[in-house]
Image (cartoon, grey):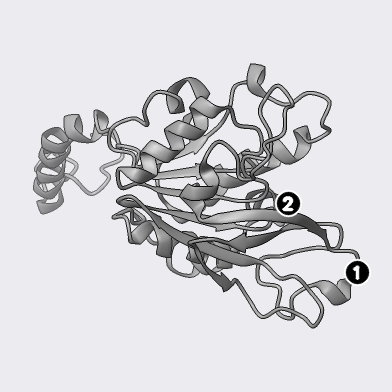
């Protein structure tokens, strides 16, 4: 042995450390194949429509990609394993094992995709969406009831109008979700959903709200602001992660690791 390294003496006589090293090596051999071949089963799916499905001419590409990136970032920060699915998958059936479906800025949905979301929730899944769910079809035709494609029944709400935050006085007092001047929220009317404020709103403001609705065996949660796009632009958000974690836990999805102090940072 060159350099000794504490495993043996110069004449080659093994030291106790050599035996411990051997024990450790045997453990690596025993566990090696299991660790090497391990695959974590995704239990959360993120709707990421294909490029052919994207809206052209609506000037929303930046928001679309921010929302998709922000949703994935939030899930990684939350330590759950996401799987990306597009309309060809969602229009048929959500893959086995998926318990939560995240719909970041899913504002253009055809009827088949909306029906797939409906089936998923009806069978017991959780769907989480933000502004501006099911506003129109991919070909540009606007739904007369928003969210469209029957998702108004799934989420238990009807969108009434958008609300633009024009000045700082309209922002929430504590603003835990990092809303900014120039952002937009949905003014919604609940039909069957239970709606609660997401934080303390400022006077004369339309604050962020969370609408929760039981549908079939599952649950649909609607966030009336650009939650996932803002997550990316603000560099993360503890409040949104905690909100998602609570909803996920109700459906058996928990973080696979905790990182202590780091998890309390944006």
**Residue 4 left/right relative to 27:** right
Marker count (numbered): 2
Asked if the residue at tag 2 contacts the one at tag 1, i.e. Cβ–Cβ closer than 8 Å, the answer is no
The residue to which callout 2 is attached is: 233
Q: Residue 12, labelled with which disc? A: none
CA gap between label 1 and label 2 equals: 19 Å
Q: Is residue 244 above or below residue 3?
A: below
| Screen quadrant of the C terminus | bottom right
Q: Residues within 10 Å of mark 2 (few under 14, many from 20)?
A: some
In which quadrant of the rendered view does residue 163 lie? bottom right
15 left or right, relative to 80: left
- The residue where tag 1 is placed is 167
Q: Position of residue 132 (x, y in %)?
A: 67, 46
Mark 1 neighbour class, 10 Å CA radius: few under 14, some 14 to 19, many 20 or more: few
Q: Nearer the viewer, residue 246 or 162?
A: 162
Viewer-nearest residue: 204 or 150 = 150
Q: Please name which of the two marks, 1 or 2, marks the residue nearer to the observer.
A: 1
Q: Inspect this view and state whether residue 176 appears.
A: yes
The quadrant of the rendering that contains the N terminus is top left
Q: Position of residue 16 (x, y in %)?
A: 10, 53
Q: Residue at x 45, y 37 (%)?
A: 117
Q: Does residue 115 lie above or below 264 as drawn?
A: above
Residue 209: percent from the left, percent from the top?
62, 67
Under tag 2, what secondary structure?
Answer: helix
Q: Earlier in the sequence, mark 1 or mark 2?
A: 1
| SS assignment at label 1 | loop
């Amino acid at each position: 042995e060159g350099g000794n390294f504490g495993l043996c003496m110069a004449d080659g006589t093994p030291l106790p450390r050599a035996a411990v090293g051997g024990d450790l090596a045997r453990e690596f051999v025993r566990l090696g194949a299991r660790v090497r071949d391990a695959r974590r089963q995704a239990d959360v799916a993120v709707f990421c429509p294909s490029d052919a499905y994207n809206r052209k001419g609506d000037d929303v590409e930046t928001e679309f990609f921010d929302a998709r990136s922000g949703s994935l970032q939030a899930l990684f920060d939350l330590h759950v394993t996401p799987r990306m699915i597009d309309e060809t998958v969602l229009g048929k059936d959500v893959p086995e094992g998926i318990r939560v479906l995240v719909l970041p800025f899913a504002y253009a949905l055809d009827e088949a995709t909306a029906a797939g979301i409906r089936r998923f929730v009806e069978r017991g899944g959780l769907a989480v969406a933000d502004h501006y769910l099911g506003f129109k079809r991919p070909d540009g035709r606007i739904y007369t009831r928003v969210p469209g494609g029957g998702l108004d029944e799934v989420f238990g709400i009807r969108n009434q109008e958008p609300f633009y935050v024009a000045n700082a006085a309209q922002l929430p007092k504590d603003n835990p979700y990092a809303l900014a001047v120039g952002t937009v929220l949905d003014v919604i009317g609940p039909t069957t959903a239970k709606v609660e404020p997401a934080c303390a709103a400022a006077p004369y403001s339309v604050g962020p709200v969370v609408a929760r609705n039981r549908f079939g065996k599952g649950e649909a949660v609607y966030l009336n602001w650009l939650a996932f796009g803002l997550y990316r632009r603000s560099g993360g958000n503890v409040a949104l992660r905690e909100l998602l974690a609570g909803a996920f836990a109700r459906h058996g999805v928990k973080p696979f690791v905790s990182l202590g102090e780091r998890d309390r940072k944006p």
